[in-house]
Image (cartoon, helix red, strand yellow):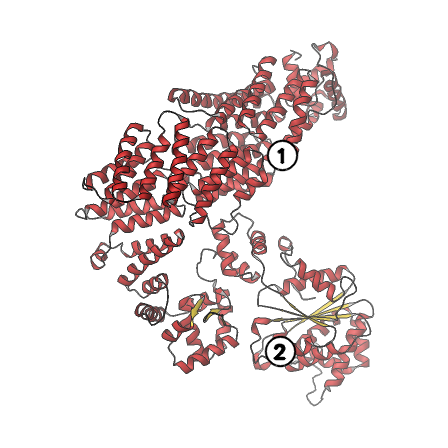
Amino acid sequence: MPLPDLPADVRELIGRQAELDELASAIGVRGDGSHRAVLLGGDAGVGKTRLLTELRDVAFGTGWQVVAGHCLDFGDSALPYLPFSEVIGRLANEVPNLLDEVAGQRPVLRALQPGRRTMQGSEQDTSAAVGRGDLFDAVHGLLDAVAEESPLLLVLEDVHWADTSTRDLIRFLLSRPFEHQVAIVASYRSDDLHRRHPLRQASAEWGRIPGVARMQLDPLGPRDVRSLVKQLHPAPLRESEMAGILARAEGNAFFVEELVGATSAHGGPVPEDLADLLLVRLDRLSESAQLVVRAASVSGRRVSHGLLTEVAPVTADALESALREAVELNVLVPTSNDFYRFRHALLAEAVYGDLLPGERVRMHAAYVGALASGRASGTAAELARHARAAHDLATAVDASIRAGDEAMSVGGPDEAADHFSTAIELLADPASRTDVAVDLGYLGHRVSDALIASGRPGRALSVVREMLEGLADDWPAEQRGRLLIAMATAVMVEETRLNPLEFTEEALRLIPDEPSRLRATVLAAHARAHALNDNVDQAREVGAEALTLAETQDLPRLATEVITTLAALGAKGSEDVRSGLEEAVRRAEETGAAGAQLRSLFLLGRWHQDRASFPAAVEKFERAYAVAVGIGQPWAPFAFDSRLLLAQIATITGDLDDAVRLSDVSGQAPPAVPETLLAAIDLTVRATRGDEKAAALLPQLRSHWSKDGLIPITVGPAAIELHALKGDVDAVIAEHDAVVETMTALWREFFHARVRLGAVTLGALACCVPGLVGAERERVAEVADRVIEGSRRTLALQAEETTHWGPEGVAWAARLTAEHLRLRWLLGIDPPDEAELIESWRTALDRFTDYGHRWEIARCQARLAAVLQAGGDQAQARSFADPARAEATRLGAAPLLAELRGLGAAPRQRAVQSNEALTARESEILALVAQGRSNGEIGKQLFIATKTVSVHVSNILAKLGASTRTEAAAIAQRNKLL
């Protein structure tokens, strides 16, 4: 059958299983079937052929025969009965004897055989007339004869291109019953059925025939489009790229494939082949209708009737006629609020892309005239876009700034940032600044606020710095001062080595030392900059002055921001910080200072988190994030940070599904850094659960490491865990070193998270020990010494700086020591005393219990149980292994469950204390086991069968009371059996 065969890698049917089940059931491919035929409608590219191909495979699988015929677009030169000629040609190949038999009885069938319909047909006879009734009966009889052997499915595709004769034959087949089981499915493009299309009336008549059902194939839903994109593009895509495809494809499978293939997700031009296909629809319109549609495309996806009346280059009467034509041909769709929209967004893009450059400028100028004069209503954003395209600089700058202000007022920081950035771009030429009166200080301050609110502080830093560097020396001091404050604000929330004091101090020198709102703003920023530099006394002094000035200048929101800064400093101790922040939250709520409320709640949440008071921390972070969402700034500093810490806390408290939910950005448009950090949380969960496929995400995540230090210190440990699952020692070491190198460049060499990184690395290396041989073990021991040295120097530096080291830091420091001792114990290189090893893991368990990290508690329990069991204390080992197993099961932590399975559940005897219980051969084999040799390697070295080695190893494990080869090697090292 000539339905397409799909490559093996795209065979999965996405988003159409329900439709497939409905279609197969309707015609009896599955079940009894309630209809003899189905008319399948859907827009071009929506997936009709894909669905029919799947139906074909289902039919074949249930013993049906399937044949298909296609209608083609020959315009006025249509070939009558073309799809049935194709069907007969297929039957001539598949059942030639049956076809000859039926054609012998009904010679009229030979007229439809493909070879006879060409100009070279050897038996063509133009004098012979074929009776339609005889022909219809013959086709019906042929299909019935084919179905006598087994049920037959006849598929007719693209019947919107069918000629009159073909439509008549289809109607005949639909209305006349078959003696045997014959089902018919006819597909057509519903978006081609304009009011005068011949199939429109025909399909309505067919649908009223008993046994004929109609089925409409709707566009794919967002979730299914995501699945299709992932099938077509296995490499991970950023959510912004995915969102671009979702918005532009509108659920059309063909559009999705074209956009993914052309990597056109960022709003680039429509792929040329797709544009050509879309523009074919425009060719059917009259000249005046084409002019109106072209004018509409300049507006974008939709345009109001009033605006189109002003800009379309046709008379009022011609406009009405043109719009009716465009609607009838499904190019435009009227909406209930006096607007018209293009049937597909990509159609609007294709039409606009087809405009000539001069034509485009003239049309945009017409829109500017209509909007600026008030003859048509529109937004500042619309005016700004048209003015820019029309090269109207003054109007574009003014409208862009107004559009940015409007966007910020309704919680749209991303759009606001784009509008302000457009204004700055238009003013890039210093000469243009003399032609357009703009306060660059205000504009820089606004774009910085918008970019920070949208979660792009790094971009804010770059934009404001460029503006500062581009100012003339004699530029007004106040405008320069505003830019400096914008710069300092961006520095305080961005990953950078710049010091905000550098900018606040210069701003203070520029702004007159007299009461003013700008002076209050500068002092508030200066106090905060001192606080970030731990200059507590200076921060209090400047903050007090800023607070007084803010209150006298009637700036309640700024005053609340200053109160938040002062509260975070504390007066006498940590409880003062908490009470001060709670008061700042109350004050912010009273004054409506959402920014201060957000910052105060976040800082209060951190205060609780640092003390492992997770329920209280979660409550504050949830409130902070709710405030941010309420003002339309979910990616702003302190807003996104609250969401991120909620996800991190969920991994600590063992609510892994909640962590996954919080890290899911589907349907959102996060900036790169927040998206990567949330992906890192998801990676952490997947590593905990042993999902080795998650390693495919690492290259994309690593590309963002240099943008924020939190990324490598979150991704790195998870990646190390994934490498350990494969026993890849080199990858574990490389990952550790890469994190240290990146963090040294971003922060400093001995960063606090290096302790956790070291503990995870040593634990991963210990898990890889069973696969190591002598020389490799020595190398791992040397690496371990380097890793522990870096972590210990970090601890020493922390002690010198008297930095607060809360429950988290204490727990990881204990785990670091325990993992190092465990690694030495397993390697058999300078192994620790058994009591010391046990005590180190008891300490680590106690510290993580204090911290409340459920996953790490279970891991400590498991590893303590392994040490106790190796020492022969079976009862104690089980008392720790059982709760660890229960928690690992709850978390779905497959790697930990595998580790626990090695401990077993049945009691074992204590290990032997000498080699008297081992034979000479067993001692020899034990030495090789301790070197990490496999049974096969041992057999080759000792010239004995692998099966014999296996028997000896089993005996050794039983005598030593060990459950694994690694445990046996550790017992042998400890008891000096080697």
Q: Residues within 10 Å of mark 1 (few under 14, many from 20)?
A: many
* Sooner in the amino-acid sequence: mark 2 or mark 1: 2
Mark 1: amino acid? Ala
Q: Quadrant of the N terminus?
A: bottom right
Vertical relation: 510 (above or below) 42 = above
Return the mark for residue 301. Answer: none
Q: Quadrant of the C terminus?
A: top right
Q: Position of residue 739 (x, y in %)?
A: 46, 32
Element carrying mark 2: helix
Residue 740 lies in quadrant: top left
Name the outermost residue toward the front: 590
Q: Name the residue carrying label 1.
A: 893
Answer left or right for 830 relative to 147.
left
Q: Position of residue 699 (x, y in %)?
A: 50, 41
**Residue 376 appears anywhere in the view:** yes
Mark 2: amino acid? Leu
Q: Position of residue 134 (x, y in %)?
A: 76, 84
Q: Residue at x 42, y 81 (%)?
A: 318
Q: Name the residue carrying label 2.
A: 199
Residue 636 lies in quadrant: top left
Answer left or right for 766 relative to 574.
right
Residue 588 lies in quadrant: top left
